[in-house]
Amino acid sequence: MVAGAKTTKPAVYDADSIVHLDQMTHVQKRVSLYLGSNPLDTAMREIVDNSVDEVRAGFGTKVVLSLRSDGSIQVDDDGRGVPAGINTRSGKSGIIMALGTIGSGGKFGSDNYDGAASMGLNGIGAAATCATSKRFDVTVYQDGQIHTLSFKNGKPGFFAKDADPESEFTPSEKVQAVKDGRSAAEKKSRPTGTTIRYWSNASFFPPTDELHVDELVDRLRFTAFLVPTLVAVVNDLRDPENPIRHTFDYEGGVTEMLDVLAKDAKLHDTLFLSTVGSFTETVQVVQPDGSVKPEPVERKVPIDLALRWGNGYEANGYSFVNTIHTPLGGTHVRGF
């Protein structure tokens, strides 16, 4: 012991030292555990990815991302719409289950998306965005009605004023539903779909964290190449006097990607190969009573490959899995 050093009495450690946090509070306390090292970016991507998954599964064609001057972020899609009815097992609305509950989602089964790849399978992402938002508004167009519900830091309810995260909040789990009063043209172009608008709560995020908008725009651009049926739009409205709009629509898929990205002149037409493989694995499948049971499931693995030789000297390659860029490669690249 160093002379003169003070001794400190050991802290008491007993059963009362153990603290249990509810799921939403745990997200807020450990945001990087759920949303990674750049949580603001990931929070946005989680909402966008859900909309893109609808397009991949064949239930929509357009995803619009809008960055607004009031700091909010809005994502619109023309998919089926988040189920607004009551879940018979929990007694809660599908909106609360899908967006306001950690560990809930529609992608735990083996046949929900008919084999379509998904960018999120854990029932965490969108709910984590909701938990870390001081206001999170959900609007669903479905069954001739408009269903609405808001959340404050992950708790469902309603705000007294539109588009004001500081207005009075009343907790409630009841989804409001009114007749769809949009114009005939709007209903025709977007009969169903989901709109999510949220304001991140800065107190839950690292003080140095910021949105990397250019990277997010590039990610949507790549996604539009990889999902040829998708029209992706980015509206950067943060500066009202200088709005920026990007529209990505590439029906040519990965073949068009090479034509657009290549910097040298091509020596021949782009070669395109497409195939599907399959394998069987045993996975834990959720049963009707909520339990899980190991069952064999056949997995389909579609592969698209585009090759192009040009008159340059540099070799460039881009690889993706489930539309997610894999710049460090992986078994799919080594296998090729």
Image (tube, rainbow, N blue to C red):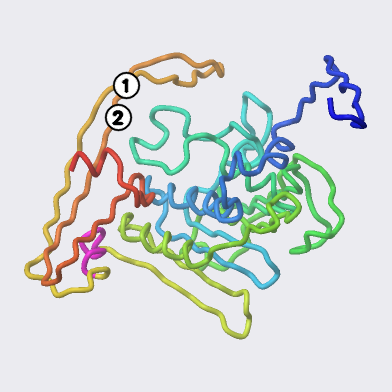
Marks 2 and 1 in Cβ contact (< 8 Å): yes
Residue 43: image tag: none
Asked if residue 255 is among those painted magenta in the image, a careful observer would answer: yes
Amino acid carrying label 2: it is Arg
Q: Secondary structure at mark 2?
A: strand
Which span of residues is magenta-colored?
Answer: 252-259
Nearer-N-terminus badge (2/1):
1
Task: Residue at 33% x, 45% y: name it.
Answer: 321
Horizontal and vertical percent position of residue 240: 63, 81
- The part of the image, by quadrant, that contains residue 160 is bottom right
Q: Which residue is mark 2?
A: 299
- Report the magenta stretch's main SS: helix
Residue lying at the far left in this picture: please name it: 268
Q: Which residue is mark 1?
A: 281
Horizontal and vertical percent position of residue 23: 69, 32
Residue lying at the far bottom in this picture: please name it: 241
Horizontal and vertical percent position of residue 101: 65, 35
Asked if residue 262 is among those painted magenta in the image, a careful observer would answer: no
Q: Secondary structure at mark 1?
A: strand
Amino acid carrying label 1: it is Glu
Measure the alpha-carbon separation of dots 2 and 1.
Answer: 7 Å
Where is 18 relative to 173, above or below?
above
| Left or right: 252 in relation to 233 | left
